[in-house]
Amino acid sequence: DAGITQSPRYKITETGRQVTLMCHQTWSHSYMFWYRQDLGHGLRLIYYSAAADITDKGEVPDGYVVSRSKTENFPLTLESATRSQTSVYFCASSLSSGGYSGELFFGEGSRLTVL
Amino acid sequence: GNSVTQMEGPVTLSEEAFLTINCTYTATGYPSLFWYVQYPGEGLQLLLKATKADDKGSNKGFEATYRKETTSFHLEKGSVQVSDSAVYFCALISSSDYKLSFGAGTTVTVRA
C-alpha cells in the first residue's frame, strides 16, 4: 500500500540496548523527519533529511543516529536506550517539488518503552 | 528562534458547542501557519493552513485566520461533533528554513 509506514508499532526494551525504528515511504518524497511526542512538549524534531545521504540534527538529537542510504527509508537508531527515550516516535515525509510547503505526511507512530 | 504557544487543555465540550483553540507564534521573516490534527491512535494530519497575513484556512468546518498584527492563528469551529475529539497542534514554518515548529498540542474531547 502507498503511504508512510513505521515499524515496529510497539516496542519494549531495556536500558542500554540498541533499538532501531524503521520508516518507509512510497511517495519518493525528498524530505523525511523523525519527531518524538511527549506529554507537555508536543512534537520535537530529532533528525531530518533533505535527500538520500543528507541528514541533519533537529532540536533533540542526542542519543539518536539516523541514516538515509535510500530515498524511501529513514531508520532511527537509539544506540544505547535510556528511560528518558520512552516516547512515541513519528516519522514524516514531505513533497520536494516547488519548495517545501509545510505539509507533512505522518506515519502512525512507534511507541517505545525503555525499562 | 521560532516558537508556537497554544492554549493548554484538555478542553471538554458538548456536541454542537463552539470551539476555539488559541495559538500565538514568534517567528523571523514571514511564516506559514498550520493546524494539524491527531485522532486517537493515529499520526498527525494537516487540517488547514495559511501562508500569508489575513489568509483564512478552512477545512471540515474548522477555520483559522492568519493575524500578523497579533501574531495569532486561532482555530475555531462553530458546532463540534463527537468525531472532532482529537489532539490539535498549531505549527509554523518560517521563510528561512523548512522545519516545522509545533505547539504542545491541545486535547479536545466532545461529549454526546
Image (tube, coloured by chain):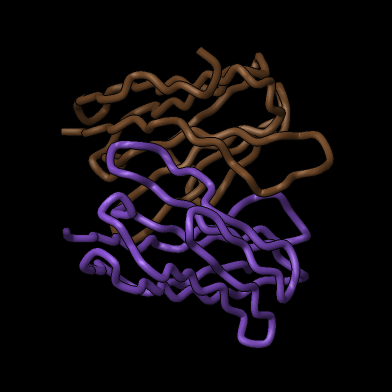
User: Which chain did the renderer colour purple?
Assistant: B
Q: Quadrant of residue B39?
A: top left
Q: Spot the residue most to the bottom.
A: B69
Q: Is residue A53 left or right of residue A36?
A: right
Q: Is residue A88 left or right of residue A27?
A: left
Q: In x, y percent, where is residue A50?
A: 71, 34
Q: Is residue B11 left or right of residue B88?
A: left
Q: In x, y percent, where is residue B47?
A: 52, 52
Residue closer to the observer: A11 or B5: B5
Residue closer to the observer: B45 or B3: B45
| Residue name at image x 61 percent, y 73 percent | B65
Q: Colour of chain A?
A: brown
Residue closer to the observer: B5 or B67: B67
Q: Is residue B29 left or right of residue B1?
A: right
Q: Classify A83 as above or below A69.
A: below
| Residue name at image x 48 percent, y 60 percent | B61
| Residue name at image x 67 percent, y 33 percent | A31
Q: In x, y percent, where is residue B33?
A: 63, 63
Q: Which quarter shows the C terminus of chain A?
A: top left
